[in-house]
Amino acid sequence: MANAFYGQSGGVSAVINATAAGIIATARQHPTVFEKVYAGRDGILGALHENLVDISEESAETLELLLHTPGGAFGSCRHRLQNPNVTHDEYQRLIEVFRAHDIRYFFYNGGGDSQDTTRKIAQVAEWMGYDLTCIGVPKTIDNDLPVTDNSPGFGSVAKYVAVSALEASFDIASMHKTSTKVFVMEVMGRRSGWIAAATGLAKDERELGPDIILVPEISFDPDAFLERVKQTVAKKGFCVVVTAEGIRDASGELLASAANQDPFGHTQFGGVAPLLVDFIKQRFNYKCHWSVCDYLQRAARHLASQTDVEQSYAVGKAAVEYAVAGLQSVMPAIVRTQSVPYQWEIKPVHISEVASGEKNMPRHFMSKDGFSVTQTGLDYFAPLIAGEAYPPYRNGLPDYRKCRNRLVPRKLPEYFGRKDGVKEPA
């Protein structure tokens, strides 16, 4: 028997805690393998700073509540581990913590950079002769993980933004004759348009939902965009636009960015919606409104997709089963075996196929003019938002709960950060 470490990494989702519930519940089914399951407080930082939460003692009621609670129950982080070929002080610290707490299983739940963290730790553990089974667990609302058909967390975001675009279009349709003519909604998507394109599901014979969808995979042409806005307003009296935050011009330059970078080196995006509104106002002087979904889209557990909840739990369950079976450096991937009716399964893929990679949305998911989603794209998205998974309610609000997150006693001296001078939060 040995102990396991579970960490949540990167931007969280509405259903990442369903994966945590799957890991905890499945580990309990193997009492001869796992003695305790520790969660890192704030992901890998919890391991570095020996801030470990014993989650193996959580009640069945808590596990049930995890299925319904958004955010990261144990805290998440954006932290890039240094190159193991150059210096090893972080990795030495990690192995010291794992050894001190008899941690022999490592489960890390996140996107491409998080899978890279798992790959690095597995590599270093092997170099240092420490027996550690490392399993990556997928999660990213951006839906850009390679190999897997879709990423846990995406389906619920897709459902939220599609519903939001639909509901907003009802509002604009009601007022357009004397008020707003154009509404622009900005959604996440640094380099891929998966989230923006999913709003195409809201477009149907009612002529509601998004009229124009902009994605990073297709260069933004301001003249073509403005002409389409003009045509749409002339035809129906109003226009609803959905844009990914990372759209680019013909030269590949971002239309808008916050000019900052996160710890993974990614440009922090935002601000394209008001920029598009300025374009429209300058050309046509239409009354316009805009909104940025931002954290709302990834925190909206009240509108989660049942498919997404089931898949998020399933990858957690599979991760533990892979570890028990002796697999190393793999990640559970979702495989679509049939679209109509929708069927899927989980299979292991080597983490090197996923780590730090990105999967762009296929061009044929968008129309030739680049402003709408094709039937092929709609067929891909539709089953991922299927089903409602409403949380329990209390006093008119979702009954979300927080875990106790009591830290286990430390066994090692305090860690003050990397020796390259970069300080880490305690």
Image: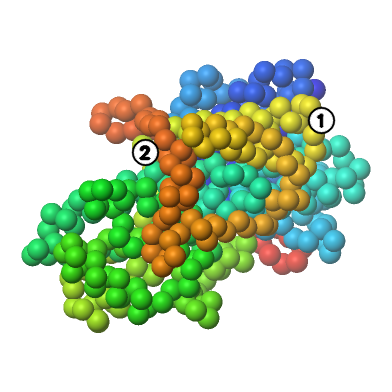
The residue that mark 1 highlights is 326
Give x and y (percent) for residue 170: 20, 51
Give x and y (percent) for residue 234: 18, 69
Question: Horizontal placement of 239 versus 44: left or right?
Answer: left
Instruction: Specify whether residue 68 is in view.
Output: yes
At label 2, the amino acid type is Leu
Residue shown at 28% from the left, 53% from the top: 209
Question: Horizontal placement of 286 versus 91: left or right?
Answer: left
Residue shown at 25% from the left, 31% from the top: 396
At label 1, the amino acid type is Gly
Q: Quadrant of residue 401?
A: top left
Residue shown at 49% from the left, 79% from the top: 250
Closest to the observer, 294 or 333: 333
Give x and y (percent) for residue 278: 29, 77
Say if 244 sits above or below 305 in the image. Answer: below
SS at mark 2 in the image: helix
The residue that mark 2 highlights is 303
In the drawing, what numbered circle is on residue 371? none
Closest to the observer, 364 or 318: 364
SS at mark 1 in the image: loop
